[in-house]
Image (cartoon, rainbow, N blue to C red):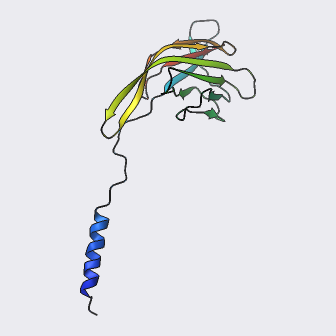
Amino acid sequence: MKIKPGFWILFLLLSGITGCTKDVRDPCLQPQTTAVLVHCVRHFDTSATLIDTALPNPVLHPLSSQPQQFYYGGVKRLVNFRLSLSNATDSSRWILRPDSANAMQDTLSFYYQRQLHFLSNACGYTYFYHLDSIQSTRNAIDSIRLEAADVTNDANVEHLKIIFK
């Protein structure tokens, strides 16, 4: 059986087109998301020593409708969690209920400065933040300790300790 020259032309043409398709993998190899890392603790007995405390069934939800904000609900025994900050305003507010079975809740208010930060040509830009202050109600929360004021794309930095009663 003899293959016609038209077949070879079509074959080479299709091979050339499929060989020029763009690779679909993301060339950005660093985190682009910035979030506040929160650690939950409480006082051990009456001493100044702090120990981890797991929130039994927490509900956290933003009071603003920014598209990049996280929502926690249905996660059991949460010790660390992340909260996103608004890239459109200089403050963000969150509702924190340590246990969904209990109506006690607190409001966390973050006040900060936004800084547009260039990551790379492949990753583009993101916002970094500098936390000026954090305020909260005191229903379940005893106090808040600011550990690191600069919020960047470094996922290993603990920014806040929330000390529960």
Q: How many marks?
A: 0
Name the side, left or right, on which 50 lies relative to 17: right
Which percent across, then down, holds residue 151?
A: 44, 22
Q: Is residue 27 above or below residue 24?
A: above
Q: Residue at x 70, y 21 (%)?
A: 105
Q: Is residue 49 above or below residue 104?
A: above
Q: Residue at x 53, y 28 (%)?
A: 82
Q: Quadrant of the C terminus?
A: top right
Return the residue found at the far front: 88
Which percent across, then down, holds residue 32?
A: 41, 35
Residue situated in front as seen by the camera: 19 or 155: 19
Name the side, left or right, on which 62 lies relative to 26: right
Residue situated in front as seen by the camera: 136 or 165: 136
Q: Is residue 153 among the parts visible in the rendering?
A: no
Residue situated in front as seen by the camera: 75 or 45: 75
Q: Residue at x 35, y 38 (%)?
A: 123
Q: Is residue 47 above or below residue 98?
A: above
- Quarter-of-image position of residue 163: top right
Residue situated in front as seen by the camera: 72 or 118: 118
Name the side, left or right, on which 9 lies relative to 112: left
- Quarter-of-image position of residue 109: top right
Return the residue found at the far top: 47
Q: Is residue 92 among the parts visible in the rendering?
A: yes
Return the residue found at the far bottom: 1
Q: Residue at x 40, y 31 (%)?
A: 126
Q: Quadrant of the N terminus?
A: bottom left
Which percent across, then down, holds residue 3?
A: 27, 88
